[in-house]
Amino acid sequence: MPLPLDHTLDNSYAALPPAFYTRLMPTPLPAPYLVAVSDQAAELIGLDAAQAAEGLQVWIGNAVPQGATPLAAVYSGHQFGVWAGQLGDGRAILLGDVATAAGHMELQWKGAGQTPYSRMGDGRAVLRSSIREFLCSEAMAALGLPTSRALALAGSDQGVMRETVETAAVVVRMAPSFVRFGSFEHWYYRKQPEQLKILADYVIARFFPALLEQEQPYAALLQEVTERTARLMAQWQSVGFMHGVMNTDNMSILGLTLDYGPFGFMESFDPGHICNHTDQHGRYNYANQPEIGHWNCYALAQALMPLIDDVPLAQGALDRYQPVFAAEMERLLHAKLGLSQLPEHAEADRALFDAMFGVMEANAVDFTLFFRQLSRLKRADTSGDSAVRDLFIDREAFDRWAAQYRTRLQHEAADDGERAAAMNRVNPKYVLRNYLAQVAIEKAQNKDFSEIHRLLSVLRHPYDEQPEHAAYAALPPDWASHLEVSCSS
């Protein structure tokens, strides 16, 4: 293939012992077509958009670049809090990794055919879910959240059976690593500490070499991952993102947002909102995400205990979760409200935030619009209130909270204009609402990919006003309330 990555592709994971993976080739798809390429993701590995567009046969899995060592990794995990045993890359195949100025980036096909870990599945992805993953990966990156990236999306008219017959697609995903919490759990529950150590040593040497200088590098690894996970959970909460399936096999050892399935962005604010139709008991609802992140870190700690061999030391690493999460959440909330973190106001600020979320919940206020429109509120008068006030059914309840907020603003040095600009840099105007993705999906199913490209362009600049695209920031239409996504999404 005439791609620069032909000459740079490596596969460090393939250097691990054979028990860690199965080498295999992707299963070809007939008559492939290119749906979209992310030029920004392509740039990360030294490709321009034109070069990336030439790679269709590679992106669909019909051709393998020189130097690639395709493999599917084995791992295990807890699913919905229950030990599920061996899992693995059931529809993902790792091509290899590309050396970049910022470090190595792994490339992975998602939907390229069956693997030994498919567990009765077909190993395929469908166009519907692939569009969602492609768009959200790039949208999250634009929001500034740690995430895997989506390089390319290709499709084929070959039928794939889900609830109905759909068409096949492949997303080429990128991340520095796809190692998961469940990768460690696999060896712990199989009682194979030698392999557990090999994996931990690989992760530390490749991604956290500074930890080698620590007296107990495995405990240091647990603390590093715990802190990264805590910060990620706070960042998710701050933009109203809901993952939907926070199983340990979907948790990145690097603290990345990984495996986009039944995700969603909060619209009418409800802390108990469940974005995954499969999650009937609400384990992964919005309010639970921080606690589940902590629970998953405990599962990782259990898996690492044969290496740490010191319960207080492991507990000390885990104890970092709550203060790191709280500090990051407070930092983000202060920024979202345009407030400085003043020690003398810490307790009052927490009460202000609690009251804010309470009145938002009582009025089912749109999460993204509330924070974006709040920047228009002025410190000394109510002339800028209508944009945010009109989001509330009980406007007097908003007025009472706004009075508290204005009192707090009296202690800020920034003027209204400076504060508004700062707030708009952290409160997005545009997020990937489910209905926007659905519109793009329905057009794409008729071979019209224009909405995917348009959405990708809009979501690339989520904090900009983009007045020509204001419709993409509007309240969702009534029909959007009937959309459901599940683990099959």
Image: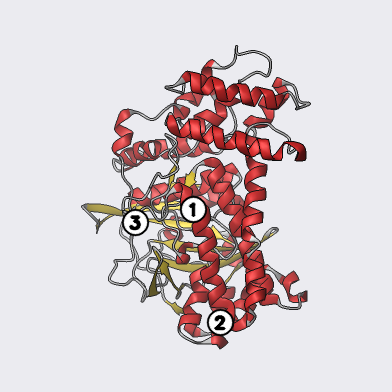
In terms of secondary structure, where does tag 3 sit?
loop
Residue located at (62% from left, 77% from top): 311
User: What is the C-alpha distance between the residues marked 3 and 1?
Assistant: 17 Å
Instruction: Find residue 475 and report its image quarter.
Output: top left
Label of residue 487 in the image: 3
Residue annotated with mark 1: 289
Up/down of 489 relative to 62, above or below = above
User: Percent position (x, y) of residue 19?
Assistant: 48, 84
* Crowd tier of the residue under label 3, counting other residues whose Cα lies within 10 Å: few below 14, some 14–19, many 20 or above: some
Nearer to us: label 3 or label 1: 1
User: Percent position (x, y) of residue 196?
Assistant: 56, 82
User: Percent position (x, y) of residue 303?
Assistant: 53, 77
User: Percent position (x, y) of residue 346?
Assistant: 70, 40
Up/down of 471 relative to 299, above or below = above
In terms of secondary structure, where does tag 1 sit?
helix
* Crowd tier of the residue under label 1, counting other residues whose Cα lies within 10 Å: few below 14, some 14–19, many 20 or above: many
The reply to whether callout 2 and callout 1 are in contact (CB within 8 Å) is no
Which amino acid, mark 3? Cys
Residue annotated with mark 2: 196
Residue located at (36% from left, 76% from top): 116
Left or right placement of residue 438 versus residue 383 in this view: left
First of labels 3, 1 by sequence position: 1
Which amino acid, mark 2? Leu
Do we see residue 47 in this rendering? no
Residue located at (39% from left, 63% from top): 80
First of labels 2, 1 by sequence position: 2
